[in-house]
Image (cartoon, helix red, strand yellow):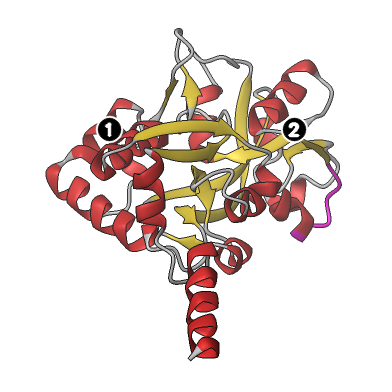
Amino acid sequence: LFYLALALTMALTLAACGGKSDSDVKYVKDKGTLVVGMTDFAPMDYRDGNGEWIGFDADMAKAFAESLGVKAEFIEITWDSKAMELETKAIDVVWNGMTLTDEVKSLMGVSEPYCKNAQVVVLSADLADQYMSADAIGSLTFAVENGSAGMKALDSLNIPYTAVDTQAKALMEVAAGSTDACVIDLLMAGAMIGPGTSYPQLATAAELESEEYGVGFRKDSDLVKTFNDFWKSAYDKGTVLSTAQTYGIAQNIIEK
């Protein structure tokens, strides 16, 4: 009986310490916050004049947190360590226009895709028409976000680049003349470059890859199903499309 009791005690202790039976939904609700890992990436996540995080992803993350009865907390992360941040529970979710690559799917539990996007070359507007195909861009110098889909697109073309922390910094490198071009998300390009934007002198050229965005959770997390159910409900209520219209990306939203 003593050994049976000891075995039961050890089993209960192991279950309490973690494992696939643990509920991330319960974990998030118990601590009262949904910690969202992201980077500064307009129009998905960026700060308003008061320093508050807004954007399509940020607004929808707040709505998802509210559906769980908790508050959303935003933490800027280094993009190429996003999977580690999840596993160590520094964050609960990666929500930042994340491309659903095979690598991402192998490292995380991921939501159903919610948004269409592409990787595009950005450079000086007066040169853009010379670089409208992948075959034409090999002579350019590039900046790209470390760990991003844009970096993988350049790797696949065997084109060298300078890796920087964020897509915003990649754009700054081009604007400053430190590199000829960068590769960023089409959605970000639509918000950040061209007439009336922060970088009116820049334009898009070659489109390298089309892709879909999803939200990342820990492997085997019950937050995946909870999120997918929330998203379908928010889509049916019109919340997803009305929020997308606010940030000018309604045409990119995947129909549910």
Q: 198 or 43, which lies in front?
A: 43
- Farthest left residue in view: 237
First-in-chain label (2 vs 1): 2
Give the secondary structure at mark 2.
strand
The answer to whether one can see residue 46 in this image is yes
Q: Name the residue that disc number 2 marks.
A: 181
| Rendered location of residue 31, percent (x, y) | 41, 41
The correct choice, above or below, for 218 with respect to 250 in the image is below
> Is 23 left, or right, of 131 in this rendering?
left
Image coordinates for residue 50, horizontal then vertical, percent: 45, 8
Residue 43, image x, y percentages: 45, 29
**Residue located beneath label 1 in the image:** 243
Rendered position, 141 above or below 83? above
Q: Is residue 74 above or below residue 160?
A: above
* Three-letter code, disc 1: Thr
Amino acid marked by disc 2:
Ala
Q: In this rendering, would 209 be left or right of 232?
A: right
Disc 2 or disc 1, which is closer to the eye?
1
Residue 19 visible in rendering:
no
For the point 27% across and 32% down, the residue is 243
Range shown magenta: 156-161
211 and 83: which is toward the camera: 83
